[in-house]
Amino acid sequence: MTATLDRTVTVEQALAVLGNTSKRVADMLRLYGITGYKSTVLSCPVAVYLHNVTGIRWQVDTGVIERDDEPGIEITIPDAVTEFICDFDNSEYPDLIKPNLIKPQPAFPGDDEDDD
């Protein structure tokens, strides 16, 4: 079952609702059906969640967020959310990671060929 997101909250309220541990943040994102990409400021699960609840795109970095349309105004995020972001980027919550749709290309031609 997926919970309904409240679109009338502030970003601070939205972050507080996620919980006080990395695991709780992950559980809440699961409850809301939120997934995202690793190591991306606009597409990680926290950024997707904040966009869904506020209608605003947020750049989410470790420790701070800022509006995508108003750079320079930073909001400190709770420690539990920062911990979740680090854990997520380290593949601690694989079920919240969206699969990449584009096959990664080798750094150099021939790198993907088998050595005989």
Image (cartoon, rainbow, N blue to C red):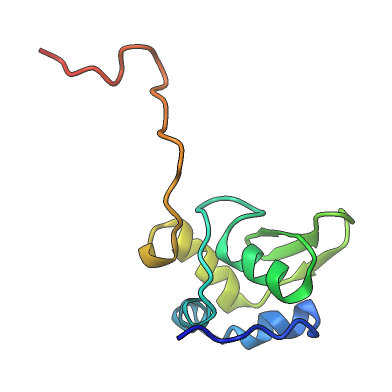
Horizontal side of residue 116 vs 102, given as left or right? left
How far from the left and from the top, in percent, is residue 75? Answer: 79, 69
Q: Nearer the viewer, residue 27 or 89?
A: 27
- Left or right, residue 72 beside residue 54: right
Locate residue 109 relative to residue 32 in the image: left or right: left
Asked if one can make out residue 1 in the rendered structure from this viewpoint, the answer is yes
Can residue 92 be seen from the camera position used here?
no
Name the residue at the left extreme.
116
Query: Residue at position x 77%, y 74% from top?
Result: 54
**Occupied quadrant, residue 94:** bottom left
Q: Which residue appears at 40% of the width and 34% of the height?
A: 103
Of residues 92 and 53, the one nearer the viewer is 53
Image quadrant assignment for residue 114: top left
Q: Residue at point 53% right, 70% down? A: 34
Q: Of 7 and 106, which appears nearest the observer?
A: 7
In which quadrant is the N terminus drawn? bottom left
Q: Is residue 20 above or below residue 65?
A: below
Q: Position of residue 20 (x, y in %)?
A: 56, 86
- Provide residue 96's location: percent of width, then percent of height: 44, 66
Residue 41: % across, % down = 65, 53
Which quarter of the image is occupied by the C terminus?
top left
* Residue closer to the observer: 76 or 66: 66
